[in-house]
Structure formats: C-alpha cells, structure tokens
Image (cartoon, rainbow, N blue to C red):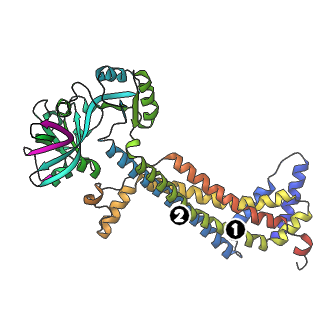
Amino acid sequence: MAEASLIEYFSASRIRYNAGMFYPLSVWIGLRYTRAERRNHFISFISFISTTGISLGVIVLITVLSVMNGFHKEVRERILGMASHADIHALTGGLSDWREAVALAGEHPRVTGAAPYVETQAMLTRGREVSGALLRGVLPAQEPKVVDVAEHMVAGSLDDLEAGKFGIILGRELSYALGVGVGDKVTAVIPKVTATPVGAVPRMKRFTVTGIFSVGMGEYDRGIAMIHMQDAAKLQRMGDQVTGIRLKLDDVFAAKRVSHELAQRFSGIFRVLKWTDHHRNFFSALKMEKRMMGLLLFFIVVIAAFNIVATLVMVVVDKRSDIAILKTFGASPRQIMSIFIIQGSVIGLIGTLIGVVLGVLLALNVEQVVDLIESLFQVQFIDPNVYYISKLPSDLHWQDVLLVGGGSFLCSFIMTLYPAWNAYRTMPAEALRYE
C-alpha cells in the first residue's frame, strides 16, 4: 500500500534525522509522485501533456526568435552596405578642414575607416523618364573603407568614377526606372539655380552611367546614385568643402559613444548621426515586433504550464490520505507544500530542458529543415524576387535561450504554488474519515 510505504519511510527518516542525518523526505515523495503508477494513468497522461506542451512552446519560441534575429541581422547588413556606422558633419554649411578630421578620426582605436562625402538631393532624367535620387559624391579609394558597396556591384566598378569625367553609378532599381545601362547618359538636376541672361535656371549636369549596384534593399537600389566627390563639389560649387565624414567602427553598437567622442575632439559645432538614426522608426518597429512576438509565443508555454495546475490538483485529491498520514506523523506545512512544488517543478524542468535542447538544434539547422520541407512538398516559402533572400536566416542568441528557459521554468514553478497550498490546507480528520 502507498500509505504503508510512506509511513515506513517517514518513520525511518525521522530516526535518521534524529541521529543527525538529513534525509530529503519532500524530495523523495515528490519524485515518487512524479513517476507513473498503474492506477493513475490519467494523471500520468496529463503530466505527459504538460511536459510536451512546455517543450513545444520553448522550441517554437527559441526558433522564432532566432529567425527574427536572422532577419534583423540580414536587414542590418544590407543597410550597412550603403550606410556608414556614424556620420559627422557641420551643423551649417560644409566641412573645410575635412582632411584633418579624417586623420583625427583614424586615430581613434574603435574607428576602422573614415571617408568624406558630398551629398545632395537630385532629379535624374533620361528622355521622358524622371526619378528622384540622393546624389552622393564619394572618393573611390576611400569609400570601400566605410561601406561594402564595391562587393555589390553588378556592372562596372567603383574605380570607374574619375574626377572630371562625370561618371555616375546607379542602383539597379533606379537604372530600371530610368531605362539606362552602362554607357548611357543621364541628366542630374539639383535644387539650386544659376543666374543667366534669360533668368534663373536650375543647375544641371549630364553624366555617363559607369556602373550599377544592388544591395538588396529598395530604398538604396531605387534612391541612391554615386558620383566622384570632386564632381559633386563642383556641381554644388562647394570648393574644397565636404558635407561630412562617414565612419566605420569595429562595433556597430558603439557608434553613438564613439561619434560623440570624435565630435568633441573636432573644433567647431558638429551634428552626429549614428546608423540607427537614419532608420529610427524602422529599427524601433523591428524591436517592438520581436518583443510582441516573443510575448505572444510565450503564452504557449503559459497555457502548457496551466496543465501542471490540473495535474497537481488531481494528485492532491488522489493523495489526501497520504497527506493526512504525513501530517499525523508530524510533517510540517513546509514539507507538505514542498512535495507538490517539487513534483510540478520537475515536470516544468524536464519540459524546459527538452525544449531548450531541441529548440537550439532546430534554430541552428532551420535552413536545412526548410530546404528539406521545400524539396519534399515542392513549395517555396521565400521568394527571392520579393524578399531579396533565398534562405531562411537564423541567428541564435544565447541570452534569448536563457531568457526563454528561465521564464519557462519560473512559470512552471509559479503554477505549483496553488496546488501545494491546497495540499497544505488538507485536514487529516476529514481526509481519513472514510479510509
């Protein structure tokens, strides 16, 4: 009988405790209740469902967060293919002593590259085709130190930009919109006027397309055009001045601190922009999306943990006589509650560990799993013509794993408190009345 075994064990444990040996009574009984018994198949089934539900919730949560991290990383890398980690430019007008500023920026231990630039809004035309674009003047020798646009050239080269020859490199979508290719002519019109005998006319210049790039983001492929910095300065009549300095750092997340440190070293008043400032709303939306998705998916774990409450409540009802006998032999309320807290915590711990292991394995191999599913069912989850990527990216962050695992176990532990308290309230006389 279960009652007899508990009486014998509790009596023996009291003898050992009185002899100076600590014997974990609550742990032993809690683990004993966790194991399946022949007459409690339904309780065992509910325990299995609870463990499985927690495991599935943890697996899904870790995998989805990893995939979202992968998408964020992919987007960040594409943005940084054209955007520098930090920009420093004058509050008004242009920078005249930019060579000294570039040399000073290069002395900072966190700066790995610095390059000047001249930038203005322009309208590009060819025949009847018209498209607005950001016209950026760069130095071909220094620009690759800041961004990796040279790696995304699909036609021509960044070195084809030569001062005085007025060559231009377009984004692929922009070249499609204008209907031009390498060797064709486009006219750039900037929002400045030139006084002539017939009146003020917009300032414009004819350029020859020398290259086409594609970074996989419509914002850049459709809205950026690059020319030589000297040509851009001549077009805007800036002389030897530049719009600002673009920086590349060894850590993109140190951009704010490093750019402010550099701005304090320069003489004059400067405006400092880090890479997230150019897309503040976009990155804020991505962060909010990850938080809300994680919160919603965590409810899968919470719902599965509610099964622990049902399991322990039925165990408490089934073991009322055992609880009464333990209380009669002097078991403390803390010991009674610990029995069921341990039982529920073991269920949560097993489910969490299984979910963490399988979730990590799935997150690390999600691309292979997706490829297998696509090959088996002849489907395509990601269209590269729409998303600019052909694989499902995944970036596993161990802090996410620890957060999900810790949250799952904590939720399971909290769910054990009410059934444990209900067991503590069991009255021995009422429980043994009909035994």
Q: Position of residue 10 (x, y in %)?
A: 86, 59
Name the kind of residue labelled 1 in the image: Val
Instruction: Report whether residue 395 is seen.
Output: no
Residue identifier under label 1: 309
| Real-space Cα separation, disc 1 to disc 2, in angstroms | 18 Å
Residue pictured at 13% horizontal, 49% vertical? 125
Residue 182, magenta (yes or no): yes
Name the kind of residue labelled 2 in the image: Leu
Instruction: Report whether residue 383 is seen.
Output: yes
Residue pictured at 86% horizontal, 55% vertical? 13
In the image, residue 235 above or below residue 295? above
Q: Quadrant of the N terminus?
A: bottom right
Magenta residues span: 178-196
Residue identifier under label 2: 56
Task: Name the residue at the bottom extreme.
Answer: 434
Q: Decide which of 407, 295 is in the foreground and name it.
A: 295
Q: Position of residue 20 (x, y in %)?
A: 88, 45
Q: Quadrant of the C terminus?
A: bottom right
- Snapshot quadrant of residue 318: bottom right
> What kind of element bears circle 2?
helix
